[in-house]
Image (spheres, rainbow, N blue to C red):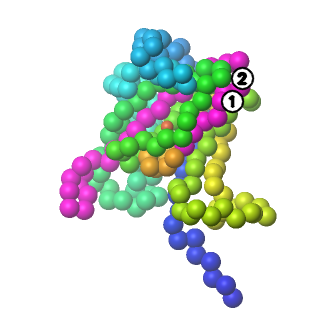
Amino acid sequence: MLEVHPIFQTPIFVCELNGITDACDLEPYIRKCCSDTPGKFEHGMVVQSRYDLNRDEKLAPLCREIFEIARSIAQNVYRYSPNYVVEITSMWGNIQKPGCFFPAHIHHNNVFSGVFYLNDDDGFPPVTFWRPTETMLDPKKQEYNVFNQGSFRRPVKKDTLIMFPAWLNHSVDINTTARDRVGISFNLMLRGEYYNTRM
Ligand SMILES: [Fe+2]
């Protein structure tokens, strides 16, 4: 008998917040926020807004959902102390124009990160999460599973919220459609006592 223990796991979290984009009229608002920062945040890849959209009343309903989900993740999934206070440290709009992509990156100095999608298209690229580098070897696989897969893709739909550990590398391929792919990204910190320090 061979015992197999999947000892360390990396969760990502997906939640449908159906109707919130249209109810709050978020897509035109985010487009406006992004157009308010012409050039400044254009990297040839995406157009981004300022990073404090969590202060805007327009985003309050979405932020309330995010707070609730983050508290549930911290307490019920990670089983962290219930004393932590969830803080949105930054929130910004992204317009991924046709031909543009997000290179692989992580979100430093936070516990969780996430993205909320304001529109969809069958041709939009999914967000891809990348396994942390554990080995230099890359054996041939017969089929992919949680032990050998190097990446995980999640297709995007309007009104979908995806949250993940902030350290998890992720990217988005080139937008090959003729439409802008519009979303809101954010970072979360758990404020409170940590071992030997307070954050
Ligand atoms: Fe990101």
Query: Quick one: which residue is furthest to the front in this view?
Result: 136
* Dominant SS in magenta: strand
Q: Quadrant of residue 153?
A: top right
Residue bounds of the magenta highlight:
170-199
In the foreground, 7 or 82: 7
Left or right: 59 in relation to 129: left
Identify whether 6 is placed above or below 20: below
Q: Which mark is residue 124?
A: 1
| Horizontal side of residue 177 vs 62, given as left or right | right
Q: Position of residue 197 (x, y in %)?
A: 20, 56
**Residue at the spot of label 2:** 177
Identity of the residue furthest to the left in this view: 197
Q: Is residue 198 magenta?
A: yes
Q: Is mark 1 within 8 Å of ligand 1?
A: no
Q: Are marks 1 and 2 in contact (CB under 8 Å)?
A: yes
Q: Is residue 21 visible?
A: no
Q: Earlier in the sequence, mark 1 or mark 2?
A: 1
Residue found 64% across the figure and 43% down from its top: 154
Q: Which mark is residue 1?
A: none
Q: Is residue 54 magenta?
A: no
